[in-house]
Amino acid sequence: MKLSLLIRPELIAVPIRAIDKWQTLAALAELPVRAGCYAASAMPAILDAILLRERSMSTGMEFGVAIPHAAVDGIDELITVLGICPDGIPFDAVDKQPARIVVLLIIPRQKKLAHIKTLAEIARLLSRGEVRSRLLTSNTPAEVVQAVIELENVTPRG
């Protein structure tokens, strides 16, 4: 599924300020509570699942991108939260670069396998330099959404 179909302005933090990936994950996991995606009482279990997954293997990728994700009980639909971190956050990435774009996927446990393609689609989109540049120069959640919509449908140069 395309990122443009998943993101909503109320689930985007621009900029997100955190000192490490753990603080980032906690801040991003709280946005869906404020947006009404799940109850505050569900937050500890969801955050635990996210942190457990991250401890098992870092989701920091290349080019300043991280895509943390976890399958959890108690939600019916995929929740996508996006954080833009212009200064970068240490994320134990493959290329040792700090994460500047973090896409958190909170996946319903019963739909886990269905969203592997979604994760790959998001990784493919964020591997494009022009997409990352545009996101990093976005100042509001609305600008982030607009950038994703516009760039998702552009054939990559190369």
Image (cartoon, rainbow, N blue to C red):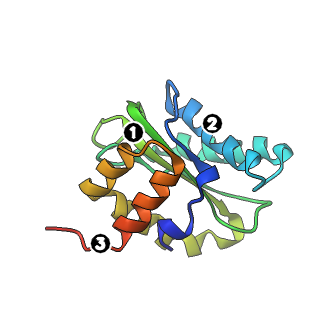
Q: Quadrant of the rendered structure where residue 23 is?
A: top right
The alpha-carbon separation of the residues under discs 3 and 1 comes to 24 Å
Where residue 76 appears, as percent x and y from the top left, is: 75, 68
| Residue type at the position of mark 1 | Ala
Could you tell whether 98 is left or right of 30 in the image? left
Q: Quadrant of the rendered structure where residue 124 is?
A: bottom left
The correct choice, above or below, for 49 with respect to 100 in the image is below
First reached walking from the N terminus: tag 1 or tag 2? 2
Could you tell whether 155 is left or right of 24 in the image? left
Badge 1 element: strand
Q: Crowding at label 2, few (<14), some or many (≥20) Cα neighbours within 10 Å?
A: some
Where residue 111 appears, as percent x and y from the top left, is: 66, 72
The circle on residue 154 is: 3
Which mark lies nearer to you, 3 or 1?
3
Q: Residue at x 39, y 39 (%)?
A: 99
The circle on residue 109 is: none
Decide which of 152, 106 is in the foreground and name it.
152
First reached walking from the N terminus: tag 3 or tag 1? 1
| Residue type at the position of mark 3 | Val
Badge 2 element: helix
The correct choice, above or below, for 94 with respect to 126 in the image is above
The quadrant of the image that shows the C terminus is bottom left
Residue pointed to by mark 1: 99
| Residue type at the position of mark 2 | Ala
Q: Residue at x 82, y 43 (%)?
A: 40
Residue pointed to by mark 2: 27
Where residue 75 appears, as percent x and y from the top left, is: 76, 62
